[in-house]
């Protein structure tokens, strides 16, 4: 054990990696996870009204929704983040917000990142959900009508649950993309895994070690998230699992 | 900050930022195009490796696509940008093409980094497209006595391209947007950098980032229209 500690203490690279890089990046993981989870929840909730408006036949509903989705999907996320962070930062100090309870939050890049990433996720998921809503078999909503359900009840009990199930695989991919996108928060001073890596880069004048270590952490996070989402998908689809066929000897025992 | 003065900021020439933004757009399109071609070449190689009978080639391609697709693009751009620049410099000096004072241009490094990332995404798309080509088509070509390069050029490649088109179109839309990440390296003044420069010097952040977003939107919409026309053309022999 002492040999190993000596080795670390005597090596410049190793002592940097063990005493500064690994603790620093591990500390930053909760920030990345917070960004991912909050934006996933808020973004997906916002996506529901956007998707509903998008499939509506009324022009005053579907046109704004169409434009919103186009804006979110047609411009780079980085531009959206800069627009919200610097643009609002230019406007807000001159308004009532400056003196309200919100101000302490609005000086922090974190909340701007949450805002931008949630709006962006809402646009992407809204489009996915639109496709899924349109893919819900017509007969099922008709059955709801035949039962005398109101429009809202049909939506809540039939259309939405069915649509979510249809687009679950796509939403999983989207969530992984969101986890990767949170790294963009580092450009507006948020100290997530990426932000910490870039800070350590500047502090230590080492180009590669912080970036490679952060890359490894992202690979692990993506792996865990993918596993979790696959499990969730299986769990939500439990009723359509194929019954497991028992082999003859299992039924008869080892007789 | 009335609207009158804001529009004057977009003037062409020394007083406004219109020409800087347009030049930025030009660079964004150039970087995207070059990186797209690099990515396409790497994607073909990757797809070939994934479908080859050699286990090690398959594993190498799997490693490439898995890692690249799991790591944030921003991080990859920074990593590949630095490592690509020094590796290329070392290589050029090593084979005697250059002396110590050589500088790899930011443009080349950006194209290499972005192309390497998109190669991984295109590998998956092209692999799927190659597998979608009906077996009978390739068998017919073999029955005609075509040799492998000819089979690839006349049958596999054109057929595959049609299956790959929707996915490849999406990649084009993504690469134009992801080229904005180049701005964090601070080496090439592409569209977002140009917008950021303008915003920084005039303090008109809201106006210039909105303008930048609009220019990106125009690029996206134009690309979408072009892709729709291309898809229609490539599918003209197909009954719907």
Image (spheres, coloured by chain):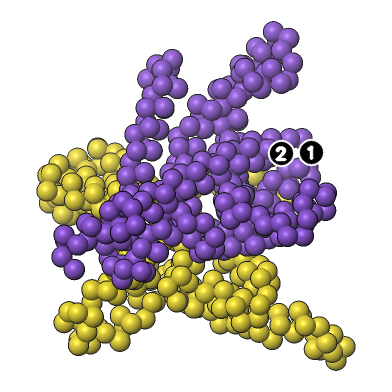
Name the mark on residue B49: 2
Q: Few, some or many C-alpha atoms within 10 Å of disc 1 (few <14, some 14-19, many ≥20)?
A: few
* Picture quadrant where residue B8 is located: bottom left
Q: Which SS class for mark 2?
A: helix
**Is B75 positioned to the left or the right of B146 in the image?**
left
Split into 4 quadrants, where in the image is the N terminus of chain A? bottom right
**Is A29 positioned to the left or the right of A112 in the image?**
right
- Is residue B79 visible in this depiction of the protein? yes
Chain ID, mark 2: B
Name the mark on residue A124: none
Question: For the view shown, which residue lies furthest in the top direction?
Answer: B144
Nearest the camera: A146 or B6? Answer: B6
Residue at left 71%, top 21%?
B149
Looking at the image, is mark 1 or mark 2 earlier in the sequence?
2
Q: Few, some or many C-alpha atoms within 10 Å of disc 2 (few <14, some 14-19, many ≥20)?
A: many
**Residue identifier under label 1:** B54
Nearest the camera: B120 or A255? Answer: B120
- Is residue A180 visible in this depiction of the protein? no
- Please report contact status of discs 1 and 2: CB closer than 8 Å, yes or no: yes
Q: Position of residue A252 (x, y in %)?
A: 66, 47
Q: Is residue B237 shown above or below A79?
A: above
Q: Position of residue B45 (x, y in %)?
A: 68, 38
Q: Colour of chain A?
A: yellow
Q: Colour of chain B?
A: purple
């Amino acid at each position: 054990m002492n040999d190993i500690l000596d080795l670390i203490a005597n090596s410049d690279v190793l002592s940097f990696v063990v005493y500064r890089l690994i603790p620093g990046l591990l500390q930053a993981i909760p920030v990345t996870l917070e960004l991912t989870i909050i934006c996933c929840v808020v973004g997906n909730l916002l996506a529901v009204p956007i998707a509903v408006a998008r499939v509506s036949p009324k022009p005053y509903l579907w046109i704004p929704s169409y434009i919103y989705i186009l804006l979110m999907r047609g411009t780079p996320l980085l531009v959206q983040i800069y627009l919200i962070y610097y643009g609002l930062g230019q406007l807000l100090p001159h308004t009532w917000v400056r003196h309200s309870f919100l101000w302490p939050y609005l000086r922090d890049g974190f909340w701007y990142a949450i805002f931008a990433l949630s709006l962006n996720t809402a646009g992407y998921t809204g489009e996915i959900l639109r496709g899924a809503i349109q893919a819900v078999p017509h007969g099922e909503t008709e059955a709801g009508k035949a039962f005398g359900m109101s429009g809202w009840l049909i939506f809540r009990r039939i259309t939405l649950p069915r649509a979510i199930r249809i687009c679950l695989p796509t939403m999983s991919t989207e969530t992984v993309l969101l986890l990767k996108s949170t790294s963009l928060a580092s450009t507006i001073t948020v100290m997530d895994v990426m932000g910490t890596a870039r800070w350590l880069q500047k502090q230590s004048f080492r180009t590669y070690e912080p970036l490679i270590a952060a890359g490894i952490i992202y690979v692990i996070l993506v792996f865990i998230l993918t596993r979790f989402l696959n499990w969730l998908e299986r769990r939500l689809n439990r009723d359509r699992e194929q019954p497991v066929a028992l082999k003859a000897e299992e039924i008869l025992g080892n007789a | 900050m009335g609207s009158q003065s804001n529009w004057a900021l977009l003037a062409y020439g020394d007083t406004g930022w219109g020409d800087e933004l347009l030049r930025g757009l030009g660079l964004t399109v150039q970087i995207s195009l070059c990186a797209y071609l690099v990515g396409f070449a790497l994607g073909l190689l990757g797809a070939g490796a994934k479908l080859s009978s050699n286990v090690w080639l398959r594993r190498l391609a799997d490693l490439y696509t898995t890692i690249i697709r799991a790591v944030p693009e921003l991080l990859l751009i920074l990593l590949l940008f630095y490592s690509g620049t020094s590796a290329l410099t070392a290589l050029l000096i090593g084979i005697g093409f250059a002396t110590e004072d050589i500088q790899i241009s930011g443009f080349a490094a950006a194209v290499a980094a972005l192309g390497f990332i998109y190669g991984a995404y295109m590998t998956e798309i092209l692999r799927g497209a190659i597998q979608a080509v009906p077996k009978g088509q390739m068998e017919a070509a073999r029955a005609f006595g075509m040799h492998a390069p000819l089979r690839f050029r006349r049958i596999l490649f054109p057929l595959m391209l049609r299956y790959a088109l929707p996915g490849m179109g999406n990649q084009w839309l993504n690469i134009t947007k992801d080229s904005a990440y180049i701005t964090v390296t601070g080496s090439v003044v592409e569209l977002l950098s140009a917008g950021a420069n303008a915003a920084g010097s005039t303090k008109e952040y809201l106006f210039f980032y909105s303008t930048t977003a609009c220019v990106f939107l125009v690029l996206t919409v134009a690309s979408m229209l072009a892709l729709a026309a291309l898809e229609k053309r490539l599918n003209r022999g197909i009954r719907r």
